[in-house]
Amino acid sequence: LQNLSHILKFYSFFFLFFFFYGLSLQKNGSFQNFTYMILRSLSLVNYKNIKAANIVFSPKINCFIGNNGVGKTNLLDAICYLSFCKSTLTKADSSIINHTQNFSIIEGNYIDEHGEDLQIYCGLQRGSKKHFKRNKKEYKRLSQHLGLIPLIFVTPADSSIISEGSDERRKLMDVLLSQLDATYIDALSKYNKALNQRNSLLKKDGEPDLLLLDVLENQMAYNGELIFSKRKSLINEFIPVFDRIFHLLSGTQEHSVIKYVSHCQRGPLLEIIQKGRQKDLIMGYSLYGIHRDDLEFFLDDYPLKREGSQGQSKTFLLALKLSQFYFLKQTCSKTTPLLLLDDIFDKLDSLRVERLVHLVSSEEFGQIFMTDTNRDHLDKILKQCKKPYKIFSVDNGIITDKEKDKHV
């Protein structure tokens, strides 16, 4: 709880920084001619603990108030699902279906950056393939949808990017690339399929099917080198954005480094995988490939994960999140991403809450969705912003619109 409190308090500095940074960019014209994607309404049926909901949103600020564990984060997760075609909280699609039911429906009605209506629908049934539709037309491949609705989700759990294993850091790259490049997810899916099949062969007793191993290793190598190339290009473009934001945020002369590490840097991936085959047979799984890629973070040549202070780690993390928002805004056809803020006001005093709300209501941001455990002082602060807003209460999966839009 103490660590969570520290993380949440530090997020206030993240937003205060972006306020001043955003103003400087606006003066330089960097944020001119951007357009917003707006989620007008959301309908949910049997989404986790939300059995039924029909919500009409404000085009600017939407606040969801309720105790912990009542469904606020599930609501934000449903919005993420319509952008990423999957949950941010669980890997299995069946886990989003209410445990007493056999199906779930998510439907969002948007206005795109051209002012056109856009309907996104997802239907799931236990034991069946999910159906994802755009304007009532089903996608042949989910990769065709990714990147259409750019989104950044800020949560206290983001600390795992630094503290946990390489899976979290690969996820950071995957989330960005999936919103920028439709071919990336397709290549990643093919790579993972071949990887899982190869691992199954490696675990079997007796001599493996060498011909099949050759086929799978060629598939891994082909798609893996494509993924490596795209990750490498992403990091090269991302680092200058991160460096600028980190130094503005930290206010120090510390030298920050993001280093991309991959087996592909040793030579042709097929050769590397095949050289490691005997070791893989002993271990029973694949030791080499882009599924082992990682990002290493350094400050003044020292590994951040092992030797960075709590303050340094938080600064680095927040610079990463800021860079994601700004990077997407610059690259996704200049469409401002939706911004989702989960319980970041917890433990903050009323002054910091006021500053945060004023910040996210500025023109640098598009549509905002935020959760909180209480609405103390929130009404007064929102009224002072003079921007459209709505407040909803959430109680055991039931979502109630507390009032009509203000300042619309």
Image (cartoon, grey):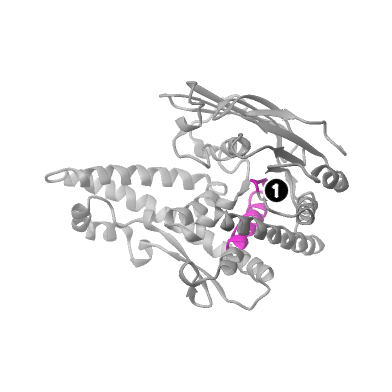
Residue furthest left in the image: 206
Chain part drawn in magenta? 317-343
Residue 273 image-quadrant placement: bottom left
In the rendered structure, the answer to whether residue 361 lies left or right of residue 322 reads: right
Residue 322, magenta (yes or no): yes
Position of residue 237 measured from the top left corner of the image (x, y, whole percent): 57, 63
**Is residue 55 among the parts visible in the rendering?**
yes
Name the amino acid, label 1: Thr
Residue at image location 37% in from the left, 57% down from the top = 292
In the rendered structure, the answer to whether residue 240 lies left or right of residue 390 reads: left
Residue 297, magenta (yes or no): no
- Viewer-proximal residue among 247 and 117: 247
Please tell me how crowded label 1 is: few (under 14), some (14-19), or many (20+) other residues with Cα within 10 Å. Answer: many
Residue annotated with mark 1: 336
Position of residue 253 measured from the top left corner of the image (x, y, whole percent): 63, 78
Position of residue 248 measured from the top left corner of the image (x, y, whole percent): 69, 69
| 395 over 306 or under it: above or below | above
- Viewer-proximal residue among 324 and 359: 359
Residue at image location 77% in from the left, 42% down from the top = 60
- Viewer-proximal residue among 241 and 401: 401
Determine whether the residue tagged by mark 1 lies in a helix, strand or loop: strand
| 324 over 143 or under it: above or below | below
